[in-house]
Image (spheres, rainbow, N blue to C red):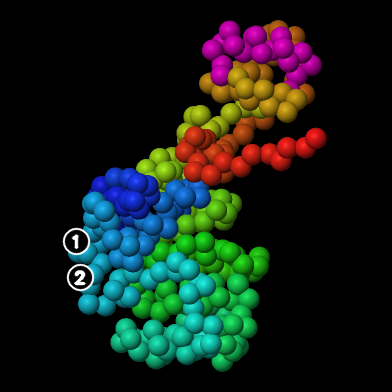
Amino acid sequence: MIKTENLTKKFGDKTAVDRLNLTLQPGAVTGFLGPNGSGKSTTMKMIISLVQPTHGKVIIDGKKYSDFREPVKKIGTLIDPSTLDKNFTAEQHLSIIATAAGIEKSRIEEMLDVTGLQSVKNKKVKSYSLGMKQRLGVATALIGNPDTIILDEPFNGLDIDGIKWLRKLFRQLADHGKAVIVSSHLMREIEAVADRVVIIGQGKLLADMTMGEMNEKSLSSYVYVEANDIAKFKNVLQKKHALIKPHNAGLKVRNLEASEIGRLAHDHQIILFQLTKVNPSLEDLFTEITDGKVEYVAKGVKTK
């Protein structure tokens, strides 16, 4: 189990991570999310002591990462596949890692099989596509059979088969009791595989919930309606204390169930064209939670 206690990192006047308190549990896939510049990568690097905290600490099963004699067997990471030596083959790269960590050579072949790199194991990394480099990065993270796996943007460069493989792999690892922490901007992939989501913004913890809890958030689910007299129906709904927001040709309605909305339309002789309950996507929730917490905001191009 990994715990961060008031974890803080400052770079000059900028606070990248601000008093972050997290508990990352074994046996679960945790989606670690946040806008660009939110402090995700800095947090992951502090967990494995690549970056030292300004304040606070990271505790891994009661110890610091630096206290473990064989840290690669405790935490495996894929932080940046571009750091792979391009002049090594996959087999050479994994052999160096295995030798340095005292890992049996048979594990190299096992990881090449798991990641689908067996047929290209003797090709140099510089000939690899981004997806192949990602697979080698995953092999590197797993070679020590660690208790925790931390992966930053592991879906980048993977084709559909690669994404499906990675989803299945994450599930298998979690089902075997390992903690899997995945950072990605691909919300659909996180939603497909995560048991829990952690969202940070401007270095602060914004949300920490299971996927079930996410789906129960009242502000994210709504009923979408379209009607022949939308202005009249809006007034009817507001009198019932519904929260209403215009959307496309209709309304997003919260605080009223679809059945009650249907009865109100009938009672007021309003014809409904559409009445649909919409459950939130992870992207919807992410946008809602990080509103106003985005470091970089793009503006439209001005045209004459």
Q: Residue at x 47, y 38 (%)?
A: 293
Q: Quadrant of residue 242?
A: top right
In the rendered structure, find residue 95 and report the number of the disc placed on it: none
What is the secondary structure assignment of the residue under circle 1? loop
Give the vertical position of 144 relative to 294 (above or below). Answer: below
Question: Where, by quadrant of the figure, is residue 108 drawn?
Answer: bottom left
Observer-side mark, 2 or 1, equals 2
Q: Read off the residue under disc 2.
A: 67
- Residue at the spot x=33%, y=62% of the render? 51
Of 159 and 210, which appears nearest the observer?
159
User: What distance separates the C-alpha of mark 2 from that of mark 1?
Assistant: 10 Å
The answer to whether residue 275 is visible is no
Give the image location of residue 50, x and y in percent.
Answer: 33, 66
Q: Position of residue 62 (x, y in %)?
A: 19, 61
Residue 151 vs 98, above or below: the answer is above
Q: Which residues are magenta?
A: 225-243
**In the picture provided, is 32 more to the left or to the right than 277?**
left
